Amino acid sequence: MLQGYLRADGRKGVRNVVVVAYLVECAHHVAREIATPFRERGVHLIGFPGCYPNPYSLAMMEKLCTHPNVGGALLVSLGCEGFDKRQLKRTINASGRPVLTVGIQDVGGTRRAIAAGRAWLESILPAIGQQQPVAMGIDELTVGTICGGSDATSGLTANPAMGVAFDLLVADGAKTIFEETGELIGMEDLMAARAANPALGAELKRSVAKAATYYATLGYASFAPGNADGGLTTIEEKSLGAYAKSGQSTIAGVVKPGIAPPRKGLYLLDVVPDGEVRFGFPNINDNAEIAELIACGSQVILFSTGRGSVVGSAIAPVIKVCANPDTYKRMEDDMDVDAGRILEGRATLPEVGREIYELVQRIGNGEPTKSEALGHQEFILTYKSFEPLGPACLPV
Amino acid sequence: MASSDQDGRKAPRKVVARAVMRLSPRDNVAVALRALKSGETVMLDGTPITIRANIAVGHKLAAQTIEKGAIILKYSCPIGTATSAIAPGEHVHTHNVESNYLPTYELPK
């Protein structure tokens, strides 16, 4: 049994974070100055850098600021940017969370805006700190999974072990989300065969075909030079390893960023924008994907790495599962799980899978991850555009 | 990963871990479970195979003769096409395999 923070909508968070959100890059410095002295008290910095309005980024910020792990939000606006700050504030207000907008132009500049933001944080943090957690079931948990800094060991150890953990979580009634359709290229037929029904299978194939077209237009696969250094030869080989994160469960549906899975089970998050290629690469780095998994309601993230990524995230704890035994020895301080033991014959895949499953519950109960303890709170949000989900994406 | 080259010269272990593994019986490649040295002979599915390059952990080697144009199978899945003939024990990577979907980007050497 877990402990969680109950929100007005009935969802429960495994953390009680206050976010400080800049609504344009011009407000980033002020927001960071407001948040920095409160970093050890659960205040996280998020934001959107663009000045032009974009429905995707507004929806992402609404979902993130009302995420179950979030207990309150301070919005930092320059004043003239295109972001719909009133709509965002209304959404946060309606969720029952404390919210304040500090307008830098309104209050008279940098110094006054920083003072106003810090004073508000001081006023709300005691009550947030005193909120008592309540009992929470594994079936109230949404867990997202991602791989980053992959090498050829990722698909042999960490990814299939996270797949085992996913199967155990699904059996307990949790919602689980895997993602990055650009790293499922080549797996489309295997994946479609696991869909809850044929119409969903067709949607899964369509989402991967969309990713292949998108990346072909941009000229690069979702494949970094370090992937090749680590023994991955082609995008389809990387996909083969990435796909193992999903485990063996039936695929219950496809969601898009900001849409929470409606029922228990395993879901694919389609992260590639719809329509013509605009705004550049679908996700410019791993944290862009983590932010989307969180916006879909994930309270905990499982992150596998072979080369050795160090990132965490704002809002949700990130559990790092290290695939490569040499990397683990070099970077143990950053890694929560040593899945490379499988390669060395020191542990089996089911053992490491169960270890991850049990660790998810301990982290859910408040134990900090390595990246949390080190202060990692990466966050990035960029422009995208999506169409609504098709009717076959979420079969009943 | 170069530092693990020395692993092969350590005193014999009590438990001999497998050096290479074919993930699926249909595969024409195997994966290195530790760093392999050019010239060493390892057992693959009960048959000796001589390693023809230094191969880092996780990287692939040809488990059999692979003709130019053949599909590379790993875990029974196609992961690309051979761009040249590959002899058993040779390193199988970007220098002799290409994607059937999108080109692989590497930094200039």
Image: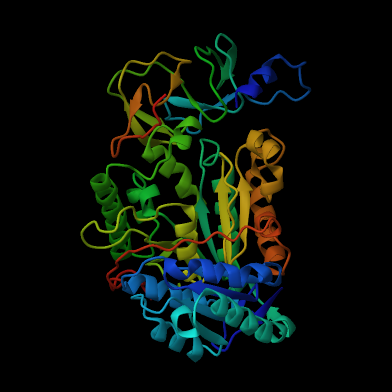
User: Where in the figure is residue B42, as x and y percent of width and height?
Assistant: 59, 16
Residue appearing at x 72%, y 84% in the figure: A126
Q: How many marks?
A: 0
Q: Considering the image in quadrants, where does the N terminus of chain A appear? A: bottom right
Residue appearing at x 58%, y 14% in the figure: B37
User: Where in the figure is residue A340, as x and y percent of width and height?
Assistant: 64, 39
In this orientation, does residue A315 appear? no
Please identify the residue farthest to the top as the structure is shown: B39
User: Does residue B33 sit above or below A106 in this rendering?
Assistant: above
In this view, the residue in front, A139 or A365, is A365
User: Where in the figure is residue A234, as x and y percent of width and height?
Assistant: 38, 35
Could you tell whether A348 is left or right of A90 in the image? right
In this view, the residue in front, A158 or B43, is A158
User: Where in the figure is residue A33, as x and y percent of width and height?
Assistant: 59, 69
User: Does residue A115 sit above or below A355 in this rendering?
Assistant: below
Q: Considering the image in quadrants, where does the C terminus of chain A appear? A: bottom left
Residue A130 position by quadrant: bottom right
Could you tell whether A389 is left or right of A314 in the image? left
Residue appearing at x 61%, y 68% in the figure: A172
User: Does residue B82 sit above or below A374 in this rendering?
Assistant: above
How are the colours assigned in the image?
rainbow
Please identify the residue farthest to the left as the structure is shown: A276
In this orientation, does residue A158 appear? yes
In this view, the residue in front, A387 or A36, is A36
User: Does residue A138 sit above or below B94 in this rendering?
Assistant: below
